[in-house]
Amino acid sequence: MIIDTDDVEFVQQLAVQYGVTVQKVDLHGLEPVLTTTLIIFGAVAAVSLFVALVDRHRGGQVIDLRPGTPKTMYRSRDVVYGLVVIYAMDGKVTVQVREPEGMFGQVLESLTTLLGELAGANVSDVAAAVTDKLGDTAAVTAESAKAGLSADRDTD
């Protein structure tokens, strides 16, 4: 499991609470270390619950497609778990995963495959591509920054 370095203490406390063992893996590189890699040991049920709780703690996903942003993809506790906020050139697209406990990771993987073709796209194109890619696993809402308009795209 890879987590933000700021979350190590929380994860270690949670591990004790749920009866799993967490071991840090030391990785050395040239870049500043902003994440920590952990190996988790324990009963399958305990590890599964532990991983789900840590994932929920990390919050939702932000994808910033605007040029010049320092990070394109990152998790944020300011975004509710199960939501993905995608910033396009002229607005934002909000993706609400219908069953986040089972589908959030899969949705994030699917969206990652779209990043190359969405860079520099406008909000309506982003919303259409996301809706097409995710099908009925999420509800997609587009909001134009210029007009302050929003258009819901429920993928049912």
Image (tube, rainbow, N blue to C red):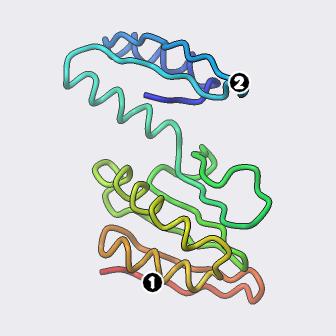
- Mark 1 sits on what residue? 153
Foreground pick, 47 / 67: 67
Q: Residue at x 55, y 78 (%)?
A: 126
* Quarter of the figure that contains the N terminus: top left
Residue 30 shows which numbered tag?
2
Q: CA distance from mark 1 to mark 2?
A: 43 Å
Q: Is residue 24 above or below residue 141?
A: above
Q: Position of residue 96 (x, y in %)?
A: 44, 65
* Callout 2 crowding tier (Cα within 10 Å): few <14, some 14–19, many ≥20: few
Q: Position of residue 35 (x, y in %)?
A: 60, 27
Q: Is residue 134 left or right of residue 35?
A: left
Q: Is residue 7 above or below residue 84?
A: above
Secondary element under disc 2, as helix, strand or loop, is loop
Q: Residue at x 65, y 82 (%)?
A: 122
Q: Position of residue 89 (x, y in %)?
A: 72, 76
Q: Position of residue 101 (x, y in %)?
A: 32, 48
Q: Residue at x 60, y 55 (%)?
A: 62
* Quarter of the figure that contains the C terminus: bottom left
Q: Is residue 81 above or below residue 140?
A: above
Residue flagged by tag 1: what amino acid is it?
Arg
Secondary element under disc 1, as helix, strand or loop, is strand
